[in-house]
Image (tube, coloured by chain):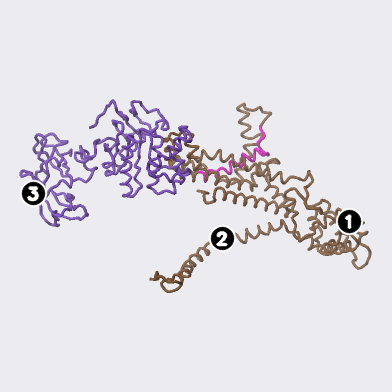
Chain colours: A purple, B brown
Amino acid sequence: MANTQNEDAFVAFERVQKSYDGETLVVKDLNLTLPKGEFLTMLGPSGSGKTTCLMMLAGFETATHGEIKIDGVSINNIPPHKRGIGMVFQNYALFPHMTIAENLSFPLEVRKIGKSDREAKVKRALDMVEMGSFGGRRPAQLSGGQQQRVALARALVFEPELVLMDEPLGALDKQLREKMQFEITHLAHELGITTVYVTHDQTEALTMSDRVAVFDDGRIQQIAPPDELYESPQNSFVAQFIGENNTLSGTVKQISNGKCVVQLDNGEEIDAKPVNVSKVGERTTVSIRPERVEFDKTRLHADAHTLKAEVLEFIYMGDIFRTRLRVAGNDEFIIKSRNAPDQVRLQPGQQIEIGWLAEDCRALEA
Amino acid sequence: MSDIKTNGPVLAADGTPLKRSLARALRVEKTRALMLIAPLLIFVLISFIIPIVSMLFRSVDNRIVEDTMPYTVAALKTWDASSGALPDEPVYAALARDMKAAAEKKEHTRIGGRLNYEESGFSSLFRKTGRAAKKFDLDSGEPFKAKLIDIHKDWGKIETWKIMQTHSVDYTNGYFLNAVDMKRTPDGAQMQDDDKRVLLKLFGRTMWMSLVITGMCILLGYPVAWILANLPARQANLLMILVLLPFWTSLLVRTSAWKVMLQQQGVINDVLVWLGFIADDSRLIIINNATGTIIAMTHILLPFMILPMYSVMQTIQPSYLRAAKSLGATNWTAFWRVYFPQSIPGIGAGSILVFILAIGYYITPEIVGGNKGVFISNRIAYHISTSLNWGLAAALGSILLAAVLILYWAYDKIVGIDNVKLG
């Protein structure tokens, strides 16, 4: 999916590198394109280079090497205020000495838009985020969620084609965050704006984005739509970072047309899908999602390999059951099962056998 | 517990009213806090506040006249100054009696000095009369009018008696009138003679130069505070030490250093001549005038401007500027519309601090100010230690204090004193 050169790309990073101290690269050889109207999320742990990328796009940092293009034009030498990119900041950065309406009016004033036009646009933008009656207040008089909406309206009021958001929901509580995720996505799609969104919250990334770029160590580890990212992680980092994941290590014993058998370190054998392994004898880490592990033998293929497991802990979480197992010497093997009327509740100490479909278990690099 | 609804006051668990219970609980804390500040409070009260109040009281206190010359003051009450005639014999008799008593207690020179502030000549008049008064025989019955006029011809002048009568009140506004270049006369308050009017000019100069100094401090201090607030912590601390360095040197030493720098044969002039910017025979006069005072005081008061500005600027997040730029503002617009308004409380705090310090400054104007660069405080010092007119000094001091308090009040109204941050 990593399409490097694309003629209709709206935003393009071409071989971009960034270093702050001249010794280490924070962003290493970044290539990324996004078409008009896409909602792209940059996801990664802190220090992975995602915010640096956003700041380079906004113009607050300069790329050490490479080019960033918007609509095919290099913007490396264009100062931030001429880029016409809307931006929502982590702490909202609403100007405390101006009212809400003045805050929204600011980008229009510096663009020398007439007064009546300005007022109409401010009103429309405030109505869009359902803050129409708050124009006369000051930012300090608003709640976090309201400030968030105003910040969004301010970034959109001058009708930019590209909007950047730097962890905009980080300061909100869970419920409000979920509501705002929904609203931001809708607004972005409705207005057809291209959005680059930075977050370290993987749920946020999965629920909001058209595509997610997972950053680590200054590189994009994988860029894909949310479902693909979750179900087919291309390497161990992505598998670990997105969602919960069980890992077992072993050696490839047998490999043929899209399937392989991995011998675990304790001698047991499992079925897996070769992703980053290609030949027999290679070391591998296999990764499997907790909800894809099956312990009801009747629901597995007759010839599927199974593993012996001992139940260590059963946790009732309401909508799901979470069971911790000891599997092939790994005490942290988790399985999740839906809380349905016919669901089995495993007891600690119980000995069971587990298995899975070969395509759910991905053999990645060691 | 006691949160059962009752009609009476809320009760604590033991049945006492909650308010009283709370007051008792807080009393211990309050007492302890008071005990901790008590030593300083007593020290300040005894050594500072009481002397200052008594000093300020001198600005209206005029009891010396009636205390020393009770009979004359009483006798003068019936004299009509506008009649154009000298007082009658009883007034002269009373004067003779007062003078004899004062001369025996050696107090006649003090009252002479007091009245001399109003009209020169009184000092010698009283000294001469006092010397003669010791030999007065009060019971002889001879007319004192002729005798006194014989001793000093001024006793035969209506002006002398007018001044005596005008200043025979216990509490006078005369010192305050003097402080604003006016005088107390039998016909009410009038302007001083032109050649005696200096104080209003000095007040004006003090205000004007303090304003200039405050303005200079803002201009020079703002960029420094900005750099301080935006540098990484390590470098900011180093720069901060440089800003604070002047605090660690004696004020006198710093001012004297300016004397070396600024004089006509001084460092700055020498360098300018050496560089060829000015000719040797047209060296700049930048000391012993207003320029010298402004230069030296700007340097000395600069830290008081930088520190409050710095502490305010530190709280302005850099993301505001970034936000402004991302919204399309140029660097200048972003600064002027977004950063500067948020830094105004710092400018306000620094300005009021510098201005209040400046209008009461004494040492620096005294050393580098010459005649043209002295402040009102130098005049106060002159009246305290040289002319010994403490009443006038107290009046000048009171006016200065009132000016500061009014400024403070106005600032509180306009900016709000809780917006002041001093670090």
Q: Nearer the viewer, residue B148 or A295?
A: A295
Q: In the image, is residue A279 above or below residue B53?
A: above
Q: Amino acid at mark 3?
A: Lys
Badge 2 element? helix
Residue identifier under label 2: B40
Q: Residues within 10 Å of mark 3 (few under 14, many from 20)?
A: some
Labelled disc at residue A297: 3
Point out the residue furthest to the left here.
A302
- Tell me if residue A288 is in the magenta stretch: no
Q: Residue furthest bottom?
A: B15
Tell me whether marks 2 and 1 sit on the same chain.
yes
**Contact check, label 3 and label 1, Cβ < 8 Å:** no
Q: CA distance from mark 3 to mark 2?
A: 85 Å
Which chain does the numbered disc 2 sit on?
B
Q: Main secondary structure of the magenta part?
A: helix
Query: Mark 1: which amino acid?
Result: Ser
- Residue A7 at x, y = what percent? 28, 25
Question: In the image, is A129 to the left or to the right of B184?
Answer: left
> For the residue labelled by badge 1, is the local secondary structure a helix, a strand or a loop?
helix
Nearer the observer, B149 or A92? A92
**Residue closer to the observer: A53 or B265:** A53
Residue numbers of the magenta segment? B284-309
Label 2 CA crowd tier, 10 Å (few <14, some 14–19, many 20+): few
Q: Is residue B211 left or right of residue B324?
A: right
User: Which residue in the structure is indicated by mark 1?
Assistant: B83
Q: Tell me the quarter of the picture where residue A163 sits.
A: top left
Q: Residue at x 34, y 29 (%)?
A: A68
Residues at marks 3 and 2 touching, judged by CB atoms closer than 8 Å:
no
Report the mark closest to the observer, 2 or 1.
1
Rendered view: A289 above or below B395: above
Front: mark 3 or 2: 3
x and y, in percent, of residue A275 in the image: 16, 36
